Image: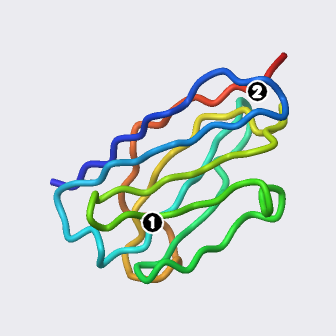
Amino acid sequence: QVQLVESGGGLVQPGGSLRLSCAASGYIFSDKAMGWYRQAPGKQREFVAGITSGGSTNYQVSVKGRFTMSRDNAKNSVYLQMNSLKPEDTAVYYCSRFRASAVIGTPDYWGQGTQVTVSS
C-alpha cells in the first residue's frame, strides 16, 4: 500500500531554516508528481509546493524564493528546504502524492503531517 512518511519538523526562530523530508513507498515513485501542503490552526489546508515526475517545480506565491522542493528518485523521497522562515509559516506540513506525473488536480495520498512552528 502507498505510504508517505514525513520528518524534519520542529521549532525554529524567525529567519531560521528547516528541511522537511518525505519517504514514499508502495508504488513506482518516479512516475508520480508530489506535493507539500500545510494547514495552520483555524485555516484550510493550502498548497505550498509541487514537483512533477520530471523535476519541474511550482510554489505558492508566499513561499517563492524562500522554499525549495526537490526529489531523489533513487531514495523515493521528496524534500522541502525552508529558509527565511516567518511566524506565518507555522502549520502542520503534509506530503502528498498526485494522481499523475504532473501537479494537477488533488492528491490521492497524504502523509500524517509534521508540525513546523516558527517562534521566538
Q: Is residue 111 above or below residue 105?
A: above
The picture places residue 100, in percent across and down from the top left corner, at: 38, 80
Residue at x-position 45% and y-position 45%: 21
Q: Is residue 88 above or below residue 37?
A: above
The Cα atoms of the two marked residues, 2 and 1, are separated by 24 Å
The residue wearing badge 2 is 118
Q: Residue furthest top?
A: 120
Quarter of the image where the C terminus is located: top right
Number of callouts in the render? 2
Q: Is residue 26 left or right of residue 112?
A: left
| Tag shown at residue 77 | none
Q: Residues within 10 Å of mark 2 (few under 14, many from 20)?
A: many
Residue at x-position 62% and y-position 62%: 49
Amino acid residing under circle 1:
Met
Residue at x-position 42% and y-position 70%: 98
Q: Is residue 51 left or right of residue 46?
A: left
The picture places residue 43, in percent across and down from the top left corner, at: 73, 40
What SS does tag 2 mark?
A: strand
The residue wearing badge 1 is 34
Q: Is residue 83 above or below residue 1?
A: above
Amino acid residing under circle 2:
Val
Looking at this view, is 99 or 120 the one in front?
120
Q: Residues within 10 Å of mark 1 (few under 14, many from 20)?
A: many
Looking at this view, is 34 or 44 the one in front?
34
Residue at x-position 84% and y-position 29%: 14
Q: Is residue 16 left or right of residue 78?
A: right
Tell me which numbered mark, 2 or 1, is placed earlier along the sequence: 1
Q: Quadrant of residue 7?
A: top left
Instruction: Check whether the beta carbons of the residues at disc 2 and disc 1 lie within 8 A of each other.
Output: no
